[in-house]
Image (cartoon, helix red, strand yellow):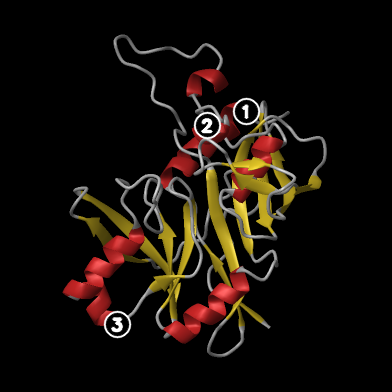
Amino acid sequence: MSQDLLPQGGTGKLGAGMADRDKTYIHLTSHAHEQSWKTEVIAESSSWICFNKHTHLGTEYDHYHQDRPHMTGIVENDLTREAGWIKERGITWLTPVHTLDFETTGASLWAKNETAAEKLKNVFHSEQPNRIYQALIHGSPEEDVFEIDLKLAAHPFQQWLMKADKTGKKSLTQCETIERLKAYTLLRCKPVTERHHQVRAHLACRKHPVVADASYGGDVLMLSELKRNYRFKKDRPEKPLMDRAAIHLEQLRFPDPDTGEEICLIAPMHRDWEVAFKYLKQYALVQ
């Protein structure tokens, strides 16, 4: 029997609200970058904790973008100095069991001990669709439900990016349409394999890049492109509704490493998604 630890708000039609509930937050601070992220703790147990990761924050150190802030560095520093959220939970060890891209938001699962880490990492490398992303893409796929089965390999000149390559690693993503919009589509994506940038690269290969994903050809989302007779403000440039890759890891499913019970975690959408969807619902729904 599975255990849904959060109400599944926002998983249906565009703009669906999430149920009211109590929330727990911690502050992740990078002193080197003079930035702090008020981060929701989605759920936790004695052996794991799950955060709702912000955009423009890496999960781990990025060899190709060494100046970017990342959660692993912040957590290691908080462990060393026994930050309040660490001390009150009695945490002495913490490591991520899967990786989210720098711009991607959503459920970020961390193990509190080595045994749990090994079990959970095995789950995410097991070629099972245990992660569900929501992605806003350009265009409209022909099918409502489809698979993208393309091998992926590192780009020969920009090795932090991925490209379709017959000599690459097996990569399979299952996709389902949530809502069709004017010039855009909201998808639910389940990666069966776990490859770097897999969902983003696969959608780009299908000529439907993720909105605002500049690395793979996605354009920013502008209100002026949605709203007829949009009035530009004098001497003030228009700000994008979405200026980072519009992809969010909404759901994780895994057996609890201590009890074996199936856990389902839901990560609520962040503020920029809510604002963008508000205007998409108002101006871009297909009648």
In the image, residue 84 lies at what x, y percent? 20, 73
Disc 3 residue type (three-letter): Thr
The local secondary structure at tag 2 comes to helix
Q: Residue 131 lies in what quarter of the image? A: bottom right
How many C-alpha atoms fall within 10 Å of the one at disc 1: few (<14), some, or many (≥20)?
some
The local secondary structure at tag 1 comes to loop
Disc 2 residue type (three-letter): Tyr
Q: Residue 1 lies in what quarter of the image? A: bottom right
Disc 1 residue type (three-letter): Ala
In the image, residue 223 lies at what x, y percent? 49, 23
The residue shown at (74%, 47%) is: 150
**Residue with the mark numbered 3:** 92
Does residue 57 appear in the picture of this structure?
A: yes
**Nearest to N terminus: mark 3 or mark 2:** 3
Q: Of tags 1 and 3, which is closer to the observer?
A: 3
**Residue with the mark numbered 1:** 284
**Nearest to N terminus: mark 1 or mark 3:** 3
**Residue with the mark numbered 2:** 279
| Left/right of residue 261 with respect to residue 166 in the rendered view | left
